[in-house]
Amino acid sequence: MKGALWIIGLGPGDWALMTELAQERLATAEIVLGYEGYLASIAGRLRRDQDVRPYPITQERLRAEDAVNLAGKGHRVALVSSGDAGIYGMAGLALEILAGQGWTADEGPAVEVVPGVTALAAAAARVGAPLMHDFVAISLSDLLTPWEVIERRIRLAAAGDFVVVFYNPKSHRRVRPLEVAQAILLQERRPTTPVALVRQAFRADENLILTQLDRFLTYPVDMVTTVIIGNSQSFTYGRWMITPRGYPR
Amino acid sequence: MKGALWIIGLGPGDWALMTELAQERLATAEIVLGYEGYLASIAGRLRRDQDVRPYPITQERLRAEDAVNLAGKGHRVALVSSGDAGIYGMAGLALEILAGQGWTADEGPAVEVVPGVTALAAAAARVGAPLMHDFVAISLSDLLTPWEVIERRIRLAAAGDFVVVFYNPKSHRRVRPLEVAQAILLQERRPTTPVALVRQAFRADENLILTQLDRFLTYPVDMVTTVIIGNSQSFTYGRWMITPRGYPR
């Protein structure tokens, strides 16, 4: 029997923020693989007869290989990511592995990427409408990308007055990149430029902080915080951060 | 009675690609407002006892004002956008109008932005995994943004090796911006850089084209096409476009 590999974006983590298609594929899967933290967030919705395989963090390649191989053996496999699977998620690795194996639509398992609400959209919704104009997404993790590339991107994004969203902004051992990012952005933008720090959007332990560019580092930020830096037109109103749709004539 | 304003991202247009929360809010709304084209895509799911108010294109401000005023009178109002309401959608305008009226959480209607699968995530899912590394979203519409700002952003995005996503790439009267964008990107990237053109993702009339930077203008592109330009590492495999998670050491 022909297997299937569904690469699924879970959205921010609340079941109600998942798409109906993602819910349906999860219900139909025989095997569900993913980082243990994400699987924990949907554990109550999976069934006992499903083979749920949690993986520790950082073992993305192993997860993707196992998922590809199980689907190749004829199983219906769900490989899950938080947010959107195609934005800093599992979709790329899984497709790269399939390509490396010479996958074809005729002979290989059915493959489908099921999109989800990505972290930047979930974060933005919780603090108003900060992404109403052109924006960039930059991961501050230098695990697979040279720091020079990342720093250059921050400079270009700052120069272009893009709204800037940082994924993976900071970890226990990686503190300096976010400090450098702040310094670069302060060269181009007002110290009072609105900044939103969003952690666990739409979840019970959600934490929302609305602050400004010159002082956002005084607040706690970790790997799963989404950092949104406004452009020159962004402003706050109460607990909202709003970026206008355009520029004054 | 206290009204509610739910600003809802419908996702790419297929009901199954909507979040459960968006579906629930739509079912609970007394009044549903939005661009007539988006409302048509969900018409079969709305009930006869709901007051559905379609608006012509371009009347975004009127739509948002009507939605705010109806919620202020105590109605449960859903204001819908395609994709994510916070990314080139209706959320910003609605919140700006509320702010202009001096809205407060105590006295005004309840306000909630319900995120959705934004066009770039939906488009990416249908062509593989092109957004696995840092990317920019740029709208090529110069209705509210000076062309100089847009062109400068394209230059900076090209220089930074960002994956580039164009929203509103082209209309009947606006053809030149996409040609200029191509010329700028060709100065920095290989002519064979993968380009995806995605129209009506996940819908019956979906159209997917995988091509390359030096020739993508030979294909039809309109206002609702999402254009994804790869970075220096992006490659194609069959009908997939894949951007690796990092750079070779």
Image (cartoon, coloured by chain):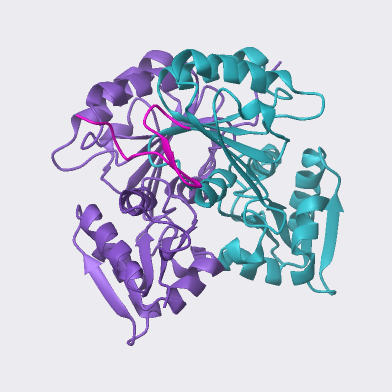
Chain colours: A purple, B cyan
| B173, above or below A4, in the image | above
User: Does the rendering let one see residue A117?
Assistant: yes
| Residue located at (80% from left, 51% from top) | B37
**Any part of residue A9 in sight:** no
- Observer-nearest of B161 and A101: A101
Q: Let me know if residue B236 is in the magenta part.
A: yes
Magenta run includes residue A86: no
- Indicate the quadrant where residue B75 lies: bottom right
Residue B123 placement (x, y as % from top left): 56, 46
Relative image position of residue B239 (x, y in whole percent): 51, 47
Main SS, magenta region, reads loop
Q: Give the magenta-colored segment's residue range.
A: B230-249
Q: Position of residue A212 (x, y in %)?
A: 40, 30
Q: Position of residue A166 (x, y in %)?
A: 37, 36
Q: Quadrant of the N terminus of chain A?
A: bottom left
Q: Is residue B232 left or right of residue B38?
A: left
Q: Is residue A38 left or right of residue A56?
A: right
Q: Is residue B150 above or below residue B5?
A: above
State the count of labels: 0
Query: In this view, which residue lies farthest toward the left?
Result: A173
Query: Is B231 situated above or below A238?
Result: above
Image quarter of residue A134: top right
Judged left or right of residue A51, residue B229 is: right
When the figure is inspected, residue A69 is found, relative to residue A24, above or below; the finding is above
Q: Quadrant of the C terminus of chain A?
A: top right
Which is more toward the observer, A6 or B134? A6
- The residue lying toward the viewer, choosing from B82 and A129, is B82
